[in-house]
Amino acid sequence: MAVQQRWKALVVLTAARTSLGFQVQSVGSISPVLLPDLGLDYVDLGTLIGLYFLPGIALTIPAGMFGRLFGDKRVVLTGLVLMAAGAVIMGMATGFTGLAGGRLVSGIGSVLLNVLMAKMVTDWFAGSRQIVLAMAIFINSFPVGLGLALLTLGWLAETHGWPMAMFVTSGLTVISLLMVALLYRVHPNDRAQATGQAAAKGSISSYEVLMVSVAGAIWGGLNGVLAIIFGFVPSYLVAGGLPIASVGVAAGLASWLIVASGYLGGYGAQRLGNVDTAMKVCLGAISVFLLAIPLTWPMPALFLAVAAMGLTTGIIMSLPSQVLRSENRGLGMGIFFLWLYLAQTSMPPLAGWLQERTQNTAAPLYLAAAAMLSLLPLYSVFRATVIRWPQTN
């Protein structure tokens, strides 16, 4: 029964988290209609996209603490309410200020969702050999939502207006809210259910903070590189002579390839058990494939790079469970995701600065390859430390 319950929880949380990827992509998908309708420019568009991630820098750690104080499920439901409300505010906006306000409200809600849902999945699968597969399934809900938004919202904005697209985005979030509220059963480690004795076990240790920070740096680095790929590779390919339409199709295929390889990597990790060698090979291979994009055949190298990245997602997301005690998972996942938001807000601008500085469209790819290679020693140190000094719950 416990096994059945954990998989039911995973299905509910994964399906609900799809709304996160859908909402992230909503502005980009409707931009061809939104920008001319409200007289906005591409600086405004970039600002709206970035505003969604900005609250994460300040709120990831408090989000974990909110889960401890009020209960994970309650905080997640609050996050979904904020996401839905933010999309409605955007749909009713008549200018940039209203759009920015709605985007910030949604972004705040998404931080609560991101941190606490990851903690909830970890609670259900911690100590299980299935955790890598579970995390791969869970984390790939984001690109699934992103892909669905790419397929639907542009058409919806063109045929029924961009406000309708935002209202549909809000509606999908409300459906996610109802799923979690009605179908998700609270885990015993949900803070609202904890006993006074559990609450008195003590604060998070320096070992946990250090190790989950290393894990977070690996996860942040991977996602920062992914942001560079999707942000700069299209312009590199167009500059190399490929048609814009073909580049768009390639980017869409790459996003779905990450999903497929993520599921495959999770399943393979469950079957193999020890995945250290595979993980190290993947990190090295990603660096090689990224360097191959400007040096050899760009399209095959791009697909190989993102496929290898997908293989690592479940493994990296399972790392916090190896070092965090059960009572510290909420705060620990907040620290973990802080590194994600720091990387996503710093690495793409650095790549852009490097391209401007060097006047070389391949410069962001060289930065991405170097960043991926730097994750190899980080992962090696993490695993060596865990093996020598394992955390005891």
Image: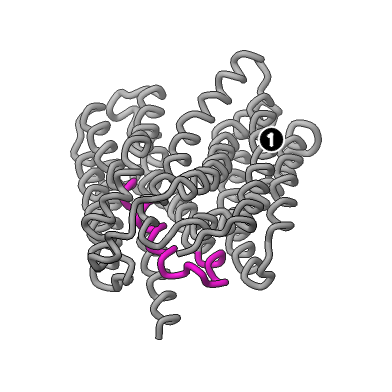
Q: Residue at x 38, y 56 (%)?
A: 328
Type of amino acid under label 1: Ala
Between 266 and 40, the one nearer to me in the picture: 266
Q: Is residue 130 visible?
A: yes
- Relative depth, front residue between 376 and 93: 376
- Measured from the top left, where is residue 67 in percent x and y? 28, 55
- The residue labelled by disc 1 is 369
Tell me which residue sits at (61%, 13%) in the image: 357
Q: Inspect the magenta stretch and tell me whether residue 125 lies in it.
A: yes
SS majority, magenta: helix
Q: Which residues lie in the magenta part?
A: 110-134
Residue at the image point whose x is 47% and y is 50% from the top: 208
- Judging depth in this view, the residue of 289 and 120 nearest the camera is 120
Horizontal arrangement in the rendering, residue 278 relative to residue 188 (left or right) = right
Coordinates of residue 235 in the picture (x, y in percent): 60, 29
On the picture, is 318 further left or further right than 261? Answer: left
Look at the picture and state if 355 lies above or below 49: above
- Seen in the picture, residue 381 relative to 326 is either above or below; the reply is above
Where's the C terminus, which quadrant? bottom left
Extreme bottom residue here? 1
193 vs 144, nearest the viewer: 193
Q: Quadrant of residue 238?
A: top right
Image x and y of residue 108, in percent: 28, 42
